Amino acid sequence: MNKSTVINPQEINAGNRVLIFDTTLRDGEQSPGATMNLEEKLQVARALARLHVDVIEAGFPIASPGDHDAVKAVAEEVDGPIVCGLARSLEKDIKSAASAVKNAKHGRIHVFLATSAIHRQFKLKKAKEEIVKQAVEAVKMALSYCKDIEFSPEDASRTEPEFLCEVVEAVIAAGATTVNIPDTVGYAVPEQYGGLMHTLKTKVPNIEQAVISVHCHNDLGLAVANSLAAVKLGARQIECTINGIGERAGNAALEEIVMAMRTRADYFGFTNGIDTPKLFGTSRLVSNTTGIHVQRNKAIVGENAFAHESGIHQDGVLKERTTYEIMHPADVGVDQSKLVMGKHSGRNAFGSRLKELGYELDDKRLMEAFEKFKVLCDKKKTIYDADLVALVEDQLVAAAPVWELDLLQVASGNRAVPTATVILRKGTGEQAQTFRDAAIGDGPIDALTNAIDRITGMTGKLLDYQVQSVTEGREAQGEVNVKVDFNGQLVHGRGFSTDIVEASAKAYLNAVCRAILTQAKPEEGAIARPGHIAPAPRAGVATP
């Protein structure tokens, strides 16, 4: 497959461009439970190509016939990035990788061999001289199939620096155009790992003939920091994965590396070719494909990455986004910042979100709605837009209430007579009066509507009763819609609450108020006195 090398090491080393090598399909797929089938791998590979990664490590061809076929399919279909296959420094591995990438427009064989003392002694049982010899032979063999060869001294960060320099010099002399320095077990720290790049740059005489790459694992949570430290001191390729998935604690996260270089260009001074507005969509594709969900507080692509609940933060963002955001959401593919409505939110953010949802309230109604919102926050952990709509709608339909629900107590059971005690408030301020009554019914809804009828003097026939969840989860708000016949007058009512019985009472009372507002006021004598217990339910009142 004698295809020309698609990168020029001298050119890359002289510039400020950092190559992004994505290994989601190889190292990322090694995450427990993250195995992908052929079509899923192709979907992710296409997304990576659209993202404009420089290299796609499509798999480990010798691992299985399926892995070989997947790498082959990606190599044949995906155009743009270099398509790479991984191989141990063994003839069978190299032949398998060569076979898999032979039809790629730009193919690469990535050969590796462990070099650290612990691996030499316990895994390979080989001396240093044998390691150097095997590495050189592997690179030369791979070169007979492909002109773009990458070599990785596995566990490089725990390899003696002098021996690592010897191996790196030997494989470059053998023809490797990229040399990867893996922190295989996530043992390195930034200062030490960056220093290792400096050592290679100053002590390997032919180092400029190859691109130094880094592949960091996240066992200590330092994968991204180590990768960026290495770039500052000479590395020009970073190996990473979408969402940071990979063996054990995972790899350096592509999205974090890319956005760190972009956001802090003043410090790093490097560029990359990633189309960043596609980051969020690619992240979600990988998450859905692998079943590995992105934690909510994950940097760049987490659900909370551009979310603000603190009232102080929300107020700052509304006045000037950069007060609390160092990146624009659109730069990573997120439509806009999210002001998360919760108990820490302020009135300014609450009002702003209502305007976005199409509701503009005067100061008095906004304050009333905000107070109800705070009460709702104590009942619910997550407040959705639909919760806000429900809250405002509930307030608007009761904008000129004749009656307001003050207390509701319902008792029911398969061996108990359903009973409802209701206290309603009429009027406002010092003129407000409260009225109490109780009633029984065929069910809890029938009982509470009977009690409301007795207090208000209205006689309603429930024609339709519908209940549905406004939002998701076990603590979701319920929405109740009713259609009531008041002596031939059909009226709709609507109520919301996390308690579905309370929502039912609000919906029915809303219908009562609507009916009163459009007909003559009932006689005061029809209002039940406190303590009065209603008789059995009237015929004709439907029982939901």
Image (spheres, rainbow, N blue to C red):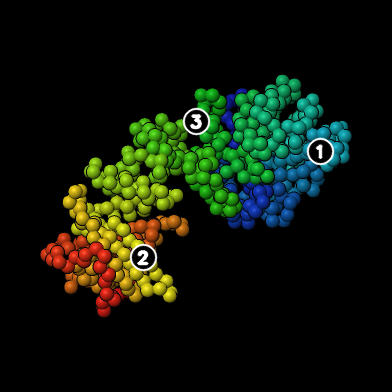
Residue at 32% over, 46% down:
371
Q: Position of residue 305 (x, y in %)?
A: 48, 40
> Which numbered disc flags the more N-terminal residue, 3 or 2?
3
- Residue bearing mark 3: 263
Which dot, 3 or 2, sits closer to the camera?
2
Q: Secondary structure at mark 3?
A: helix
> Mark 2 belongs to which amino acid?
Val
Query: What is the CA distance from the residue labelled 3 to the residue labelled 1?
Result: 39 Å
**Quarter of the image where the C terminus is located:** bottom left
**Quarter of the image where the N terminus is located:** top right
Residue at 56% over, 50% down:
293
Q: Position of residue 28 (x, y in %)?
A: 64, 46
Q: Secondary structure at mark 2?
A: strand
Q: How many marks?
A: 3
> Mark 1 belongs to which amino acid?
His
Q: Is residue 528 left or right of residue 234?
A: left
- Residue bearing mark 1: 119
> Which numbered disc flags the more N-terminal residue, 2 or 1?
1
Residue at 23% over, 60% down:
435
Q: Nearer the viewer, residue 29 or 385?
A: 385
- Residue bearing mark 2: 410
> Mark 3 belongs to which amino acid?
Thr
